[in-house]
Amino acid sequence: MKITLHAWRQKDANSPGGMQTREVDGISKDMSFLEMLDKVNEDIINEGGEPIAFDHDCREGICGTCSMMINGQAHGPDGGTTTCQLHMRSFQDGDAIHIEPWRSRAFPVVRDLVVDRSSFDRIVQAGGFVSANTGGCQDANSQLVPKVSSDLAMDAAACIGCGACVASCPNGSAMLFVAAKIGHLANLPQGQPERYSRARSMVKQMDAEGFGACSNHYECEASCPKDIPVTFISDMNRDVLKASTCHSDK
Amino acid sequence: MAFNLDSKIPEGPLADKWTKHRFDMKLVNPANKRKFNVIVVGSGLAGASAAASLSELGYNVDCFCFQDSPRRAHSIAAQGGINAAKNYPNDGDSVRRLFYDTIKGGDYRSREANVYRLAEVSNSIIDQCVAQGVPFARDYGGLLDNRSFGGAQVSRTFYARGQTGQQLLIGAYQALSKEIGKGSVTMHTRTEMLDVVTVDGKAKGIITRDLVSGEIKRHAGDAVLLCTGGYGNVFYLSTNAMGSNVTAAFRAHKKGAGFANPCYTQIHPTCIPVSSEHQSKLTLMSESLRNDGRVWVPKKKGDDRPPSDIPEGERDYYLERRYPSFGNLVPRDVASRAAKERCDEGFGVGESGLAVYLDFADAISRLGEDTIRARYGNLFQMYEKIAAENPYKTPMRIFPAVHYTMGGLWVDYNLQTTVPGLFALGECNFSDHGANRLGASALMQGLADGYFVAPYTVSNYLGEHGEMDAAKKVTTAHPAFDEAEAAVIARTERLLAVNGKQSIDSFHKRLGLIMWDNCGMGRTKETLTKALEEIPKLREEFWSDVRIPGGDKEFNAEVEKANRVADFLEFAETMCLDALTREESCGGHFREEHQSGEGEAQRDDENYAHAAVWEYTGEGNRPELSMEQLEFENVMLTTRSYK
């Protein structure tokens, strides 16, 4: 296959960036999207240039590191797929492919396609946990958890923290990410004691990081590589409302 | 100078050792804990759990990871599950049985006391994880569900769909985040450790590189914990993440930490086969699939009919045939070798002939497609994305791939390396899996070390050797930091100065091929000798012709890779030397000269029931070998049989 690759190049957070175009030959349909970029970078290095920086690690769709807009879609055209799981067989010979970093004020560009997602970590640090210190826990089976609750918690916990939801949202909202964490813990008995304070602190931090609000576009759900449903956002909103009206815990 | 390898195994009966030791160890009083700084390198299961637990106790912790978030460490990719001796299914499990299965699975090359402790704390791990909100699979009554893994005849594996590693890591990451939020852990993301600093032989800090700015920094600490994973990427193609590397462990090795059994590599039997020369990594299909999948190849050599056209009578379910009592659930090393043997004999399937079938047709007709989807849905989806075939309709094609490394930094019972104050946890150490790790035991070990062992043993070290007087503490102004920092800078400058023609990846790929061909699933004196001739040549070529674009004072993935590949090029030699020196076959180390008539691994307990510990003696010099004799007082050394 031959493709025309338009890639965003930006030296660092403070330098201006722009698209750079390159004709790429010798791509096989069985290559993953990132293997195509490996090849492009190998070519660039052999020509004496500087390779395109992009984030990636596990390359099996679970670590959430890879992150780029491909032809305007977070993680590219396939549903329920991370960039690293996308294969070139999803494209046609002669296609033009545009790749850009995640777009959000709360995710500043580090270099080329690499962005800084530490805002997500700070939201979790604000309350996205159960305060159970190591040791002294009761037997794991001493508390029954209905299978439906546990499955629902797992649906939310499948979030890999990649940030596609933010990048796809016209408001740059992180509501799906935050709702997934809140929904994971709110559906388990272990998450109950801190349920409302958690919702309140995480949402507060989310706002402080500069993420936008949700106006029900649902682009987040469409781009989520783990198919996390937006219903978790409604659940979160209910918890936040309850937290602000009925619960005075810290 | 040979190492003094005192394993510090406590006296007394096996089942009482850990309890007794916990009583004998020194404590640090709560008010004094805040006077100590602990450095934790790595934020996977071992690192995140250790950093969180030590911080909860009151220590000041600095935690480092090269990823952009601690949640992304490669523990996240573990799929199948985590073992524990809960015996919830009432099928005969016990701490003793988990201990025995692990020792036997490791082909009698691990330390009894460590393995027993691992089995002993396994139950607390499950309790801890549930309390954190890890959404383990449950049955309709609301109790926890279990499944089976290789090398065991009981169901003791807890799981969270096919994402157990992710869920356990998120649990540990949440605990870590809780401590970061309190300000008790300082997290350093996108930061790579490039050296350990020792003062009077004790670990007192590390040198790091900020991967965004390129800045080299010094960090002082009263103890340093390396939780930096395994070195499987020495093979280039493996199931490890792209960034997984040996650098932290190898730099510690250069500073005096003994490296034990580097030749023990686990080749996982069920991975998606290599499809092209551009392949950058291999993808694992969880061992849990062997609960319901049956492995087979055609009975006729070179049979290229589609699998559905091959009638039942013309299929060879070779694992069930060779190992009737364990069948498809034999341990990984046995399953991998059996697949290689069939493919070498010409029975392999797929375009390359380097694959076997993993077939779910029986299970689907017995249980229905929905049940199979509920159990393995995400794995089937992952397979379909990569192989572009529907595994509900067509059997998966699988082949063994490098997955885990049992070898690692030598540690005593306290998880301390040969350098006082330097600890190694999780895959980074060598201690619990012997020559072969059982499935679902890596997660168990990482969390055991981090939640339940290191908090005690590190406190013991600090209680005994820690300097409480702030005025007497080693600071980053110590000359040892000057020296270590200068060495790190000089090395990077030397790498950049080469200014050659070939890319770093091209060297890494060539090294991987040398290792796979000569030090892979089967090894011989001849292949290892050949590798030991080729590796130094490749290393020399690397140092005279590698091209690193850009500079080191900026975000530059090529500088990161160059440092890592340079270390792999040295470390590979130690691996091959270890494999050559170990004149026996055991677990994942299969020396073709040493096999029974039926092709099974043949150990030599008289001469090799030891851990081989290598000491660094300078680049290109032969490392020196010390041995820790393994004493077996509670299990009988027998030939492993899964027949």
Image (tube, coloured by chain):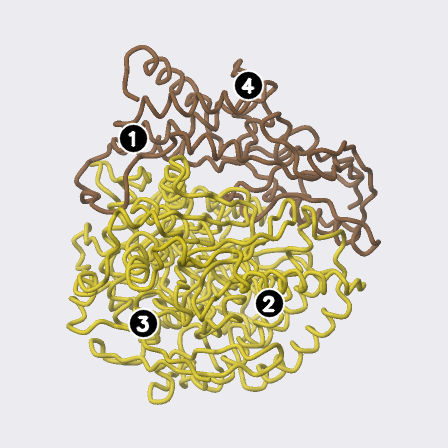
Residue at point 51% right, 42% down?
B69
Please identify which colour was used for chain A in the image.
brown
| Left or right: A120 in relation to B35 | right
Quarter-wise, where is residue B120 in the image?
A: bottom left
Looking at the image, which is closer to me, B282 or A91?
A: B282
Q: Earlier in the sequence, mark 1 or mark 4?
A: 1
Instruction: Please identify, in this view, whether the residue under mark 1 or under mark 3 is nearer the observer.
Output: 1
Tint of chain B: yellow
Please give the residue where the numbered disc 2 appears in the rendered image.
Answer: B568
Label 4 vs label 3, nearer the camera? 4
Answer yes or no: are tags 1 and 3 on the same subunit: no
Q: Mark 3 points at which residue?
A: B642
Question: In the rendered view of the protein, which quadrant contains the C terminus of chain A?
Answer: top left
Q: Do labels 1 and 2 share a chain?
A: no
**A65 or B513: nearer the viewer:** A65
Is the residue under label 3 in contact with that under label 1 (CB below 8 Å)? no
Residue, x 38% and y 58% (percent of image)? B442
Q: Residues within 10 Å of mark 4 (few under 14, many from 20)?
A: some
Q: Mark 4 — residue?
A: A212
Do the residues marked 1 and 4 share a common chain? yes
Secondary element at tag 2: helix
Asked if one can make out residue B462 in the rendered structure from this viewpoint, the answer is yes
For the residues labelled 1 and 3, the Cα–Cα distance comes to: 43 Å
Q: Which amino acid does label 1 sit on?
A: Gly
Residue located beneath label 1 in the image: A191
Q: Determine whether the residue tagged by mark 4 lies in a helix, strand or loop.
A: loop
The residues tagged by marks 1 and 2 sit, at their Cα atoms, a distance apart of 44 Å
Across and down, in percent, residue B479 comes to 55, 63
Estimate the x, y position of residue B96 in percent, counting from the top left. 19, 65
Q: Which residue type carries mark 4?
A: Gly
Residue B371, compared with residue A213, is above or below; it is: below
